[in-house]
Image (cartoon, rainbow, N blue to C red):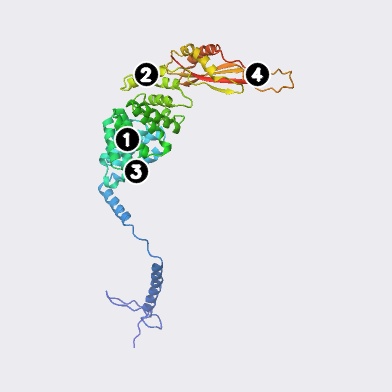
Amino acid sequence: MLRPDPNRSIPVRSGARIGISLRGGSPFRGASVALGLALGVAAPAAAQSRRYPPEPVDKDAEKAAKSNLWSAAITPERHPYQDLVHGATAALAQRTADQTTEAIKKLDAAIRLLPREPEAYRLRGDAYLERKDWAMCTADFAAADAHLRRDDESPRALAELHRKLGLCQARAGKLADAERTLAETAAAGNASGEIWMRLGEVRIAMGKLDEAIAALGSALEATDGNAQAMIHFLLAEAYDRARRPGDALTEAAEGVKLDHPLAVLHNPVLPLLGAGEASYMLGLAFSASADPAKPEYALAYFRRFVKEAPDSPWRKRADDHLRDLRSVELPDAVSRNGTARLDLDAVRAAARRAMPQMRACLARFPSVVVEVEISRSGPRTPPTDRVRPRFFTPPDGVTVRVAVGELVDRDLDGVDRCLEAQANRLALPAVHEHDVYYKVTFDVVGP
């Protein structure tokens, strides 16, 4: 019987089955070993898959990836557009003038690539809002709104875009457009307290006082106590111009309680609508202030409003306030500190007798208020007296400080000399006790 040579190669036809023979064994032994190895590997793998099931497929992510791939294929500008937008976002986060300029350049380029995409318009609108370029941020937020795919936007994001659009429209002088934008957002049920407040602010500027009061009332309901001060001051302004002075003073007093330094009026987050509006509301705030009353401040601020907005439709109402304040006997309030007993009524009477001459010192500066502080001390214990304790008392004198407005050094020096001369002539009560003093303070405003 012929045996095959193990070293000889055997030609194989295509599709033929081959059993690999191991020496001294069955030709099917190799196949059975391979099959056993395969089954041995498959069994643990199957067990592992049952114990640790595979991660579920994120259908939305898979769909988005396919969408992005398809979008990139048909819109090759998409990737460079996104790169520019991401770069601009990072630059704007730095919040510096140079980086804002760089962001605007990137967004200009992005908009040239895809002029119908809203994202770059929205970001560039933010950059111009930061710069307070109202016309440009109006145009960009309007373009973003025009190109939005509404189904992709959450109600909150859409309301935020419209809030910014309304802010820019109002400050660009487009009051009717701003009112429509903010009113539609409010009507959609997604309005924040600020949207209602800005709607009320716009309506005051338009002279729609009753509608402004209604919007500001809704703003109070939608805003917590810490952020309500500005709403109260706007309500005071609306009520005052609607000839409801009692309500106006009540709202102004509420605003002062919440913001005693009046920071929202001295440093508003955004410029108020209309020339002199901050001065007008400060006049109302100091008219309502009672701790202590400061009619001198109110007089100065209403005068400033008339100067800043001579053609305002509310000029006549400001003139009414000025007329009423001129009838107030000044100084209205005198404060004291120190260790000496003092009759404040006597001090107030002496200051009022000299007030016409003191106010004349500020005739050239009608919107300025200065605070005058006068010190008076009693006799001092001599150093030779080793029995009686000695206490520090400040020297007699007059100090003048600017409280409202600004004066250059030369003008301040002139006012200081004039007021010091008049203050030293006041017939103030003398101090007879040893080592005690008093200081009295009152305000002076021009005639």
Q: Which label lies toward us, 4 or 3?
A: 4
| Distance between the alpha carbons at the discs numbered 3 and 2 | 50 Å
Which one is earlier in the sequence, the residue at label 1 or at label 4? 1
What residue is drawn where x is 54% and y is 11%? 421
Which one is earlier in the sequence, the residue at label 4 or at label 3? 3
Q: Which mark identifies residue 307? A: 2
Q: Is residue 293 left or right of residue 206?
A: right
| Distance between the alpha carbons at the discs numbered 1 and 2 | 30 Å
| Distance between the alpha carbons at the discs numbered 1 and 4 | 61 Å
Mark 1 secondary-structure assignment: helix
Q: Amino acid at mark 2?
A: Lys
Q: Is residue 422 above or below residue 213?
A: above
Identify the residue under disc 3: 83
Instruction: Say which quadrant the N terminus sits in.
Output: bottom left
Name the residue nearer the viewer: 8 or 430.
430
Mark 4 secondary-structure assignment: loop
Which one is earlier in the sequence, the residue at label 1 or at label 2? 1
Q: Quadrant of residue 338?
A: top right
Identify the residue under disc 1: 215
Q: Say whether marks 1 and 2 touch (CB < 8 Å).
A: no
**Residue found farthest to the bottom:** 1
| Distance between the alpha carbons at the discs numbered 4 and 3 | 80 Å
